[in-house]
């Protein structure tokens, strides 16, 4: 099997709890999945399918929102007006992605207030990658090229996810991520054509973001607890390791254009496999980051909590306005 072909999706049954729903509802759900069609919010679905979607989609939404922080820090320090405008547009796009994804998750019956509470109370996951620092301008290039690059490779197959609102949200998100990746590549290209100090700054940023960006695809397949079921439901189309391999194969020729190297002595073309081999990642580090002990976990969450608290007056004002408008409508109807 090549990595460009989806795996046969039905290694695990689509309906996991035979006690749920009527025979007809279960059969309809099974046939929609088997025919690779879309489940929509009003359709019957197994509660485990709903839970998995809420988990994955909300984690994804949280990642977009927390993911604004490393780059937002650089808006005031971007080296030119052009770079500032581009970076602002990108960070704004990430906020938009978070909003589409929270809205799509709400169609499954879990409100955004609940999801937001889970995030600020530290009970929800978001992507490991956003717990690393971005100390130099070159980090903006490395994030765009590597982080958005990994996001695209992971997310293009999600445009065909079996849940309609998620799949449709992903189409627009992926288009915007392609622009993000290119702007990151272009920042690095400019630095690599600059002074020695600029070249070193670009190389240093890539050295720091390379392995964490490969970890974005999740644990190795053997340790991926959710993959088999998510693939049976046509939510995931490729395994974590398949997508990681695809990403490495895509990056190496791009790195050659940039004149940048990766900090992996085992990275080499394997003629027999038709893919690049690469070294084992530090899965202990990944576990530490997931456990909340990465370099910036505490800082990222605190910043999100502060932003939420700072926004209290906006929520109160909006609620007061809604109450006033509703009361006026009642008065108007009575008059
Ligand atoms: N970080 O069984 P699997 C972006 C957890 S958006 C943290 O393999 P699954 C755009 C996983 O949740 C980036 N946790 O899980 C941007 C599970 O724990 P749970 C976000 C991770 O769901 C760019 C456990 O490990 N993208 O970058 C990670 O089948 C620049 C076992 O793992 C998405 O969310 C991780 N890296 O596969 C924004 C894409 N990996 O929940 C701003 C949608 C795994 O059972 C600036 N999500 N875990 O407690 C997915 O495709 C999947 O959820 C995976 C994980 C592939 C992330």
Image (cartoon, rainbow, N blue to C red):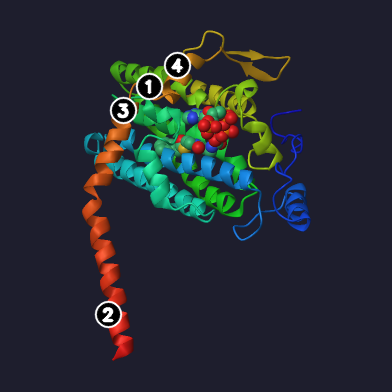
Q: Distance between the residues labelled 4 and 1?
A: 8 Å
Q: Distance between the residues labelled 4 and 2?
A: 57 Å
Residue in view at x 28 percent, y 24 percent: 135
Residue in view at x 28 percent, y 45 percent: 308
Q: How far apart are marks 1 and 3 (CA)?
A: 8 Å
Element class at badge 2: helix
Q: Which is more toward the observer, 160 or 86?
A: 160
Q: Do the residues labelled 4 and 2 touch (CB within 8 Å)?
A: no
Question: Which residue position is annotated with label 3?
Answer: 298
Label 1 within 8 A of ligand 1 by Cβ? no
Label 1 Cα crowd, 10 Å radius (few <14 / some 14-19 / many 20+): some
Q: Vertically, is 4 above or below 276? A: below
Residue in view at x 47 percent, y 39 percent: 59
Question: Which residue position is annotated with label 2?
Answer: 328
Label 4 Cα crowd, 10 Å radius (few <14 / some 14-19 / many 20+): some
Q: Residue 269: which quarter of the image?
A: top right
Element class at badge 1: loop
Q: Which is more toward the observer, 249 or 317?
A: 317
Label 4 within 8 A of ligand 1 by Cβ? no
Q: Which quadrant would the N terminus be assigned to in this image?
A: top right
Q: Distance between the residues labelled 2 and 3?
A: 45 Å
Element class at badge 3: helix
Residue in view at x 58 percent, y 26 percent: 244
Q: In this view, does 5 lie to the left or right of 109?
A: right
Instruction: Name the mark nearer the viewer: 2 or 3.
Output: 2
Q: Residue 83: which quarter of the image?
A: top left
Q: Do the residues labelled 3 and 4 touch (CB within 8 Å)?
A: no
Q: Vertically, is 287 above or below 156? A: above
Label 3 within 8 A of ligand 1 by Cβ? no
């Amino acid at each position: 099997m090549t990595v460009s072909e989806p795996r046969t999706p039905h290694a695990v049954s689509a309906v996991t709890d035979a006690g749920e729903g009527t025979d007809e509802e279960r059969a309809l759900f099974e046939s929609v999945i088997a025919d690779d069609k879309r489940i929509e919010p009003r359709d019957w679905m197994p509660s485990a399918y709903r839970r998995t979607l809420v988990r994955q989609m909300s984690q994804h939404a949280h990642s977009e929102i927390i993911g604004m922080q490393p780059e937002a820090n650089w808006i005031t320090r971007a080296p030119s007006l052009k770079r500032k405008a581009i970076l602002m547009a990108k960070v704004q796009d990430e906020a938009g992605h978070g909003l589409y994804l929270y809205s799509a998750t709400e169609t499954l019956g879990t409100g955004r207030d609940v999801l937001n509470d889970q995030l600020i109370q530290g009970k929800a996951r978001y992507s490991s990658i956003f717990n690393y620092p971005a100390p130099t301008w070159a980090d903006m290039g490395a994030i765009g090229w590597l982080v958005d690059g990994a996001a695209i490779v992971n997310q293009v197959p999600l445009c065909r996810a079996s849940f309609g609102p998620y799949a449709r949200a992903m189409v627009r998100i992926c288009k915007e991520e392609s622009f993000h990746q290119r702007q990151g590549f272009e920042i690095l290209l400019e630095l690599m054509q600059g002074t020695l100090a600029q070249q070193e700054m670009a190389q240093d940023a890539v050295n720091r973001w390379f392995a964490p960006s490969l970890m974005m695809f999740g644990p190795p397949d053997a340790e991926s607890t959710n993959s088999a079921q998510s693939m049976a439901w046509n939510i995931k189309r490729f395994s974590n390791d398949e997508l990681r391999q695809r990403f490495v194969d895509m990056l190496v020729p791009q790195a050659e254009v940039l004149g940048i190297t990766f900090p992996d002595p085992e990275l080499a073309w394997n003629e027999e496999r038709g893919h690049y081999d690469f070294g084992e990642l530090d899965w202990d580090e990944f576990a530490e980051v997931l456990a909340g002990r990465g370099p910036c976990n505490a800082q990222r969450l605190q910043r999100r909590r502060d932003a939420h608290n700072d926004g209290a007056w906006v929520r109160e004002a909006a609620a007061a306005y809604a109450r006033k408008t509703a009361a006026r409508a009642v008065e108007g109807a009575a008059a």
